[in-house]
Image (cartoon, rainbow, N blue to C red):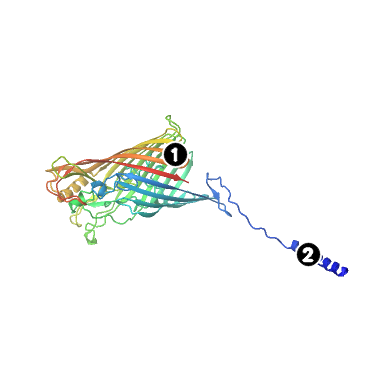
Amino acid sequence: MNFAKSLMLGGAALLVATAGAQAADLPLKAKAVEYVKVCSLYGAGFYYIPGTDTCIKLGGYIRAEYAFNAGGMTETPSWNGNAGQGNRLSNNTIYRSRADLNIDTRTATEYGVVRTYFDSVFTWTTGSDTTANGSLGVFFAFVQFAGFTFGKAVSQFSTPWHGSPGNITSNLLGGDDTSTGINQVSYTAEFGNGVSASISLEDQSSYRTASGVSNVVNTTGGAASAWLQGTGNGTNYTAGTNVPDIVGKIRVDQAWGLFQVSAAAHQIRASYYTPTLETSGHPSDKWGFAVLAALSLKNLPTGPGDSINLDATYADGATRYVIGGTSPNAFAMYSDSSAGVYQSVGFGSAPDGVFGGTNNLNGTGISTVKAWGIRGAFNHNWNPNWSTSLFGAYSSVDFGGTGGALYNAGLAAAVPGFGTTYTGNPNFNIAQVGLRTAWTPVKNLTFSGEVMWMRLDQNYSGVTAANVQPTGTKPFARYEFKDQDTVVGAVRVQRTF
């Protein structure tokens, strides 16, 4: 019995020992573990994508805005539509919430850094005359390789501050603003010491053509309602694009700031003298141009981080380089009158060119419209948490002798009294002055407040000789031609990550 028990225990021990030895001989496969590593090559926030040599950075912001006495977001003055008319259909308070997400990837190669960048926004707006409630936008989507940029990016014509030298509004006129990107194929050469030059072919169908009025206006025909809102005869005479805008830039970036000179060639094309009839013919295509000079000064004696940003632009047949960005190029504002008529109106139109006629026999060529503008801001930091910006702009539109005569002939046919009860020309100016103050209680959280005054200085004076019918809710009555002004305010809360 004792021998049998000993034999069984010994056998069990031998079996366990043998099994253990066999298990020790089996190959063990460790679970692969890849840690996300910091990529310090391109600045803070970049990480290596596991298993690759590509660095990635995720960012964005959440923003809430509230605009007062505005005609649209963001912080659009009441310069057209229901807001410009000041009627009861216009909302005095406009709300907007926005989420932004951007993805930046970079890979070092023998040709230099290959970069991709994507920036998209999700926006919800309530109260605007012109903006739908919910919208999805793609601001940027481009690839950069060996000096080339392919895709939707900031125009090579624009300055680094776009249309915001110190403001939060997207409607500071007087220069170019493509802060939400424009499709392009461009090449940038770096010469060292902060000197660079760029050449670009850019899509003109978004930012460079009209918003609110045809890019090319036929001054023949049209009702008073169209003329008094700055849209000429109210019909779109802009043809499809044929040649992209050709843009060039030279820029110097230094510790003291930057200096930039840009130029653009822009093709002007009309559809037909009679838009629905191709046999009516069309005026010949023309070329317009725009030039820009910009200066930014840093390290000012007024305080650390202070800056002055300035840019000036001149355009002939390319007015959207001056009356640009998300703004319209047709303005119509109403207010009270002391001339014994129902109300006063001020209007302005900023197309690339005008022509007249209904066919090849009586039609004219395109007369280009000239425009110039200057804008800028002084940005001052009171301390690390508080800053203030004083900003402004002045824009001027000139139809010239031939274009002005064509425009006046069309206006006189629709609005009676030209040359007797009222006189003038379609040239106009827009002045803007504003103040912005920002509080940053913690890093990347900013509360901003802004107020801006805007004046539409138009060149017609007098009253209509008879009753006319403006657009919208305005009655069939007589109106006075008069300069107009308005004030718009906004509050913004933004958390950047």
Q: Is residue 491 above or below residue 380?
A: below
Mark earlier in primary sequence (2, 1): 2
Disc 2 marks a residue whose amino acid type is: Val
Numbered marks: total? 2
Crowding around mark 1 (Cα neighbors within 10 Å: few <14, some 14 to 19, many 20+) is: some
Where is residue 163 shown, x and y percent of the image? Answer: 36, 43
Mark 2 vs mark 1: give the one in front: 2
- Determine whether the residue tagged by mark 2 lies in a helix, strand or loop: helix
Measure the alpha-carbon separation of dots 2 and 1.
70 Å
Where is residue 40 shown, x and y percent of the image? Answer: 56, 45
Residue under pointer 1: 440
* Horizontal relation, residue 277 to residue 451: left or right: left
Crowding around mark 2 (Cα neighbors within 10 Å: few <14, some 14 to 19, many 20+) is: few
* Horizontal relation, residue 341 to residue 53: left or right: left
Q: Which mark is residue 163?
A: none
Where is residue 9 shown, x and y percent of the image? Answer: 82, 66
Disc 1 marks a residue whose amino acid type is: Thr
- Determine whether the residue tagged by mark 1 lies in a helix, strand or loop: strand
Q: Which mark is residue 16?
A: 2
